[in-house]
Image: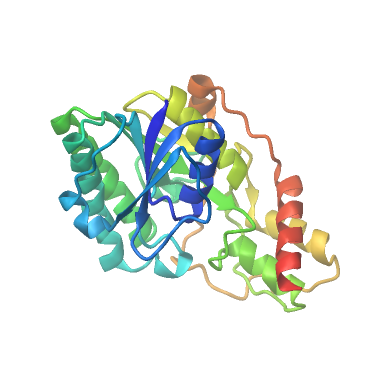
Amino acid sequence: MKRVIVAGANGFIGQELTRYLLQRNIFVYALVQKGNDLSFASPLLKKVPFEMEELNKIEIKFDFQPDLIYYLAWAGVAANLRKDAELQAKNVIYTEEILRFAHRHRIKKVIFPGSAAQYGGVGEPITGFQQPSATDAYSDAKNKAFQRAQIISKELNIEIIWTLISSVYSAKRRDNNLISYTIESLLKGETPRYTRLEQRWDYIHIHDLIRALYLIGEKGMGGKVYPVGSGVSGSLLEYVQIIRQLINPEAKLEIGVLPYKTGKVDHQMMDISALQQDTGFEPHIDFKTGIAQVIEQFRKNLL
């Protein structure tokens, strides 16, 4: 892997992956959505403005042929947009468009960011072999996009790798997810309110996720589905209590005062054995260590 395209390089994961690849002397063609930019530069970085709606019109003259595409331009990842069925449905179309873009530019491999949410209702560690169980428009669109990607990739003779990414935490992720909501509320002296927090989830630090994506690009096998996480799961209540202990052990939490959004307990536990076997990936950052670092960054930004 010497030259890659990162589509959506201006996004939360896209920026971190682009930096990581550059640090390893990999040339990156960064597809940056119009109106956005990257806060860094490199002789190994070439920025290309784009919009997903116009992707079928883009013809890029590459100085060197890219080895693969990391497709990280999914629209509507934030928690408040996951029920927007119209927005999420566009992503299914964009999935097909990126494969046709790859075909026009003779690129033979595309890595897609699926989600643990695709299997949120299975109630057991996610392997990628179970029957998908969507719980909202976001996870339903991910499942439909995966189905389309399988069909179109065979038609165009392109290898795809589909990742099932667990919940990611980072000081830079502030989209009112459970982690950022809890940290910000407690640092401000507020009382956060929750469901009963019975769900068992796997949280992965952004640095571990980026290393996993890199290894998948280097060693991942075409056609496979890789659950990506820490491989450790706990109840959401456990995670919230760890955060409270690090910020203020005496802080009040209102547990069980909110209903579950779907009326179901959504588990997201990850079986990462396939990822470990094929790529050698091992998580380096446990939740207590990683979240302590994240809390300190939040604290500095709030001062």
Question: At which x and y percent is residue 271?
Answer: 53, 34
Residue at the right extreme, as displayed? 250
Q: Residue at x 37, y 61 (%)?
A: 136
Frontmost residue, 149 versus 10: 10
Quadrant of residue 105 within the rendered picture = top left
Give left or right: position of 86 versus 81: left
Question: At which x and y percent is residue 228?
Answer: 51, 38
Q: Residue at x 53, y 32 (%)?
A: 272
Q: Is residue 21 above or below residue 93?
A: above
Colour basis: rainbow
Question: At which x and y percent is residue 184?
Answer: 68, 70
For the image shown, how many numbered marks are present on the structure?
A: 0
Quadrant of residue 51 within the rendered picture = bottom left
Q: Quadrant of the C terminus?
A: bottom right
Give left or right: position of 263 versus 110: right
Frontmost residue, 66 versus 62: 62
Question: At which x and y percent is residue 106?
Answer: 21, 30
Q: Is residue 113 visible?
A: yes
Residue at the front extreme, as displayed? 43
Q: Residue at x 25, y 31 (%)?
A: 107
Give left or right: position of 214 versus 250: left
Quadrant of residue 61 within the rendered picture = top left
Frontmost residue, 3 versus 225: 3
Q: Is residue 107 above or below residue 121?
A: above
Q: Quadrant of the N terminus?
A: top left
Q: Is residue 229 visible?
A: no
